[in-house]
Image (cartoon, helix red, strand yellow):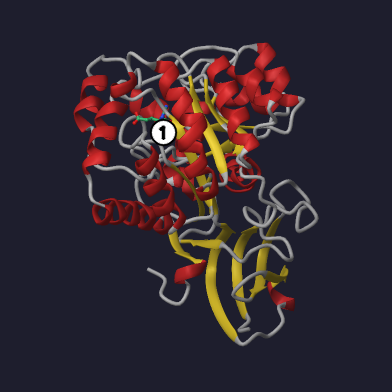
Amino acid sequence: MTTRVIRNIAELTTNDPSLGDESALGRLYDAAMVVDEEQVLWVGANATAPDADESFDAERRAVIPGFVDSHTHLVFAGERSDEFEARMAGEHYDGGGIARTVAATRAATLEDLRAGTSKRIAELEAGGVTTVEIKSGYELTVDGEARDLRLADEFTTETTWLGAHVVPSEYQKNREGYIELLLSSMLDVCAPLAKWADVFCDRGAFSVEEARVILEGARAEGLAPRLHANQLAHSGAIALAVELDCASVDHCTYLDDRDIDLLSASATVATLLPGAEFSTRSPYPSARRLLDAGVTVALATDCNPGSSYVTSMAFVIALAVREMSMSVDEALWASTKGGALALRRGDVGQLGLGARADFAVLDAPRAAHLAYRPGGNVVAATRHSLSRPR
Ligand code: NIG
Ligand code: FE
């Protein structure tokens, strides 16, 4: 296997506390790193870097672990910019527009869905994402959800069945019938196609009791649970997520002290999606309260056409820093290691020895430029494009 040494790194963030300054960021200055196509082989001082088959000069730029975007809805058709404009003029977001995307996605050809998903993946990658989670949830039929999970599987192993996104229009008068469909033929077909099950547990979507039944049914079919919770209103969804040992509970916009206590005593990650608060003009979640209580926090894009048409993790970091009082280092960690923990992955989101060699070279001497220079793309190259940095 070909080895490559990346020399002359001004600031290397490994997220391995046994390396460098021994902080959570495991940071080294004036560093080098050796990788092969699969994993990190060596990390240390530039002056002591060993030779390798190939050499890449980072030219005193910063290197970070590739971003782990642990929450996206990339498989969809159409767009809803009119809803965004209405919200900026004072309308509230209630998830009602999901039905429009369901109609557009059902009507789309597989080729069109693939092209749209592929374009959004390319945007994420250009911004430094090297691991992505993708949910279904915009067809809400047995065949449609299966088609979307098969498509998601072309791009990632982190596939999530979100048949319980909302109750589709044809079941409006037969809610129990839809839940029955979810737990019978839809789960039969979709469980082998996904790794995770998610439910939109919120006002106007599914109740805590419905979410419990759906996630328990999914778990019995081998899917691991995660949850959309407390985006629109406070509920008992956080307690449910902790009780079911969800890998992650996502949004967490409305939390009380008990929710924070439960999360801090659990292995459930709180994934914050500030692109959604930005795009729906909603209050941002209390990242500081979560972090100060010792809760593990992740940041993700939530890329979808309704509440957060965002494909830039740097933009998410900038929002977290500017609007949620996270430090740049906390936001960087939450976007990499935090995302990995939200997917229960130990091999990504960090650059310790043996980790996957997924990293991004920034067009900047320090990772702080991710938040400090919003609006441009500070990512010069990811592992996949090192031979042709932009
Ligand atoms: O995570 N909240 C539920 N699902 C998406 C939004 C879906 C939509 O509006 O199309 C979210 O924000
Ligand atoms: Fe979402």
Quadrant of image for the C terminus: bottom left
Instruction: Check disc 1 and report the residue beneath it.
Output: 275
- Which amino acid does the dot numbered 1 rest on? Gly
For label 1, being within 8 Å of ligand 1 is answered: no
Observer-nearest residue: 18 or 308?
308
Label 1 Cα neighbours within 10 Å, binned few <14 / some 14-19 / many ≥20: many
Residue 377 visible at all: no
The total of numbered circles placed on residues is 1
Residue 173 placement: quadrant: top left
Observer-nearest residue: 99 or 45?
99
Residue 64 higher or lower than 44, as above or below: above
Residue 132 higher or lower than 85, as above or below: below
Residue 335 placement: quadrant: top right
Observer-nearest residue: 193 or 184?
184
Q: Residue at x 44, y 14 (%)?
A: 203
Residue 91 higher or lower than 182, as above or below: above
Left or right: 278 as drawn, with respect to 1: left
Left or right: 305 as drawn, with respect to 356: left
Q: Residue at x 40, y 29 (%)?
A: 276
Question: In the image, residue 315 lies at what x, y percent?
Answer: 42, 42
Q: Residue at x 48, y 43 (%)?
A: 190
Question: In the image, residue 365 lies at what x, y percent?
Answer: 53, 59
Quadrant of image for the N terminus: bottom right
Question: In the image, residue 170 lies at what x, y percent?
Answer: 29, 23
Q: Residue at x 67, y 19 (%)?
A: 260
Which quadrant contains ligand 2? top left
Left or right: 23 as drawn, with respect to 121: right
The residue at the far bottom in this view is 53
Residue 97 visible at all: yes
Residue 44 higher or lower than 298, as above or below: below
Query: Which element is circle 1 on?
Result: helix
